[in-house]
Amino acid sequence: MTSSTNIRRIITKPSNIRQAIHEKVLEAVRKKFPVAGRNFTAKLVNATVKFSELSHGKQSELLLSRHNATDGVYADIDIVENSSGRTVGRLINKRICNIPYYTNRYTLMLDGNEYAVVSQMRTKSGVYTRKRGNDEIESSFNLAKGANFKLIMDPDTGIFKIDILNATLLAVAVLKILGAGGQDILNALGKELAEKNLGQLTDSQLNRARTTLYDKLVRYRKDGPGELVSAEEKDSAIRTYFNGTEIDPETTAITLGKPFSSVGPMSILEAMKKILAVYKGTEDIDERDMLEFQKIHTVEDLLAETIDKSSEITAKLRQRLDKLRLTDGKISDDALGKALAPDTFTRPLRRFITGSSLSRMPSQINPMEFVDTASIITRLGEGAISSDRAVPFGTRAVNYSYMGLIDPIAAPESFKVGIVWSAQRRRQRVLQGGRRLPYGRAHDQTLHRSVR
């Protein structure tokens, strides 16, 4: 396996998965630095993972004694005084994170138990146009960063509205706030529909959209009464918020015909054009369940994401940095060791492995169960769909793009049918970014390997 873990098979050698876990978790730990406290800043100079192979006998001994086996993330860290900029402490080869040992049975060892983490399929960020149950057409803005929302057109009146955070707003009011002009709306909708929508725009509707967006997207992040902020300041803050959103340009290039990396007036106008085209029958709805619009997160992605999204880690490090005190112009190694103890990074990992719905303990009655569990792909769990009852029936169907990756026959006998699958063990390809790899000989033999 190469140093890049972007591409790998779902079912591969456990040693490859172990290496991928080390690389991803190490990358996530690095991203947490530097950490700035009131008086001191912790800067990561160097970090590496140290791994020791455990024999089956040693693993059995640790499991029976309910002890842990871990691989450590070791780092060189400098502590810099904020006021002077000088280095007042340094840790060399300090263990700052414990990664539970990944066995050749596709499991993680923790507290005398073995846990298997299944893979999770998530829809990539993008703009997807679909038909609702009442036959209305809507475009869903599924954002990687920012609040998701939906763009809907009333087929009887031709009025576009935006549903965001339990509020329904006039779409042209939102477009005006984001900087779209009347000519932009006219070009996207045509004269008749543009006049209908702009005719609905009153000062009251504009102020309602402004206040709602500011209160729901901006104000909760800031202190102070919102009524003291001028309309221009609110509009500027709302535009700044939407400029900071993130969306997959590859996905929007397919669904909207143009790549967009954030939400703005032009992406919303393109979605309006797409809805009109679907109503007219000149374009089809988007098949959101196709694999090109999906992203498969395997165990290394989920562990790294746990660290990356943990606000607890940064808060704990800052709290401990603020307790440090200088002694003769330096900070003692003992105080630094306690401030950067491995439990800060390890605790979120332990909580995920023992408490996540994506983690399970194999019964270990049949050895093949280990491989079966490692091949599971689910749409449920943290970061994806919260309940099997929230999954549309269309999503449960077998999609033709699954060929060669998803087993179309193996399925659970429950409400999870169609949302929990098994990966095929032969001729499979997977790219964690969601794109499908070709069946035949791969062009890049470093990343794409033929499977017989």
Image (cartoon, rainbow, N blue to C red):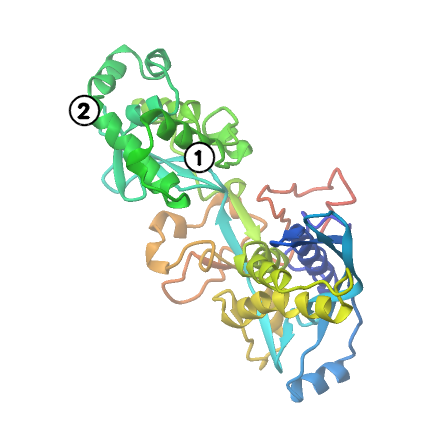
Q: Is residue 382 above or below residue 440?
A: below
The answer to which of 391 and 58 lies nearer the viewer is 58
Residue neighbourhood size for the residue with mark 2, other residues' Cα within 10 Å, grouped as few (<14), some (14–19), many (≥20):
few
Compute the Cα span from label 2 to label 1.
Answer: 30 Å
Percent position of residue 323, x then y: 62, 65
- Quarter-wise, where is residue 434 in the image? top right
- Position of 450 with respect to 161 (left or right) is right
What amino acid type is highlighted by mark number 2? Thr
Nearest to the observer: residue 150 or residue 174: 174
Q: Name the residue under label 2.
A: 157
The label number, if any, that marks residue 322 in the structure image:
none
Looking at the image, can residue 405 be seen? yes
* Residue 331 against residue 360 in the figure, above or below: above
- Residue 46 visible: no
Give the x, y percent position of residue 402: 52, 48
Would you name the residue on which mark 1 appears? Answer: 241
Element marked by disc 2: loop
Residue 23, x across and y down, in percent: 72, 55
Of the residues under marks 2 and 1, which one precedes in the sequence?
2
